[in-house]
Amino acid sequence: MSTASFIASQRTDHGVPCALSCRALGVPPSTFYARLNRKLNRTPGPAQRRRAGVDAAIKASFDASGGTYGSPRVLADLRAEGWRVSKKTVEASMARQGLQGRRPKRRRGLTRPDGRAHRVPDLLSRDFSAERADQKWVGDFKQIDTGQGPVFLGTVEDLFSRRLLGFALSDRHPTSGLAQAAVNMAVATRGGDVAGVIFHTDKGTQYTSGAFAAACAGLGIRQSMGRAGCALDNAAAESFFSTLQHERLSRRDYATRAQARRDVAAWIDQWYNRRRRHSSTDMLSPIDYELANAA
């Protein structure tokens, strides 16, 4: 029992034993009465008010992410807003509030190796770091299921900022045309001049066709490919789709293809590129990281 609690237990309506107890224990009566009034009136103290504020800020960050952020990204959000908190404080608050995202699910691959394709070297060798924008791009495809049938997403991602520069959606199984549409969007995003950039993919037929090779050559893009059937050779592109699956697709049921196309496009443009924090980019969003590192 605390000193103030003991004194409170000795209090009478006249307050005499209380005063005697305070003197005996060396506690100022003002301290006792402040504690007693706060307890009786249920007025939270500074520590309780700060804890409630931190909890509310953490819940707001978690909700804004669609319930996907873990403690590192929530911590980055709070510090950006001016809160002085530790990682342990955030972890404890999230545990107390029951805030935890779902684990990602394994995706189904769409790679169809083409043994007749021209040989393209692996220029990355699993080095997915980049010192500047438009040095290394990666791409891949993903199937998105809807009530009307699948939609297929083709992507182009810049490894420097993890920004999704280009993407294309189609109701038909991926072709070199869909791959080229995603690349064309990426080139347009960068202003039309990307000569020298490495574009790394798997050995799917969408990327090994002569038409796609000619399109890349015409833009000055250097093709690079991992080994057939080896997902780790294109792990960075796989990582984006894991994020998409975990943070968006697993939380949505699309009745129509049009609904899926609109939702995925909006998620990429409004959340992933502009707001989602990435551990590989100093906890900044892709666009903010590019702006912070602009020459």
Image: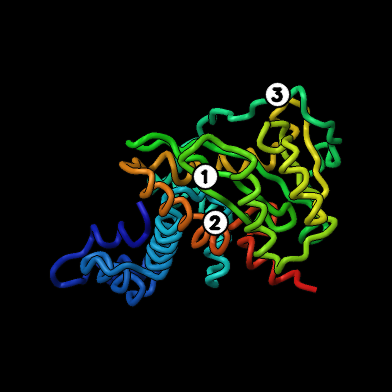
Residue drawn 77% across the image and 61% down it: 133
Could you say which quadrant of the image residue 108 lies in?
Answer: top right
Residue drawn 56% across the image and 55% down it: 73
Q: Position of residue 144 (x, y in %)?
A: 46, 38
Vertical relation: 91 (above or below) 194: above
Any mark on residue 229, and which?
3
Query: How far, Cα to Cα, is label 1 from label 2?
Result: 9 Å
Q: Is mark 3 on a helix, strand or loop?
A: loop
The amino acid pointed to by label 2 is Tyr
Q: How crowded is mark 2: few (under 14 residues within 10 Å), some or many (20 or more)?
A: many
The amino acid pointed to by label 3 is Gly
Could you say which quadrant of the image residue 24 lies in?
Answer: bottom left
Query: How far, Cα to Cα, is label 1 from label 3?
Result: 22 Å
Vertical relation: 33 (above or below) 176: below
Residue drawn 66% across the image and 64% down it: 188
Q: Nearer the viewer, residue 192 or 285?
A: 192
Q: Position of residue 89 (x, y in %)?
A: 52, 54
- Residue named by callout 1: 244
Instruction: State the quadrant of the C terminus.
Output: bottom right
- Residue named by callout 2: 272
CB-based contact (under 8 Å), mark 2 and mark 3:
no
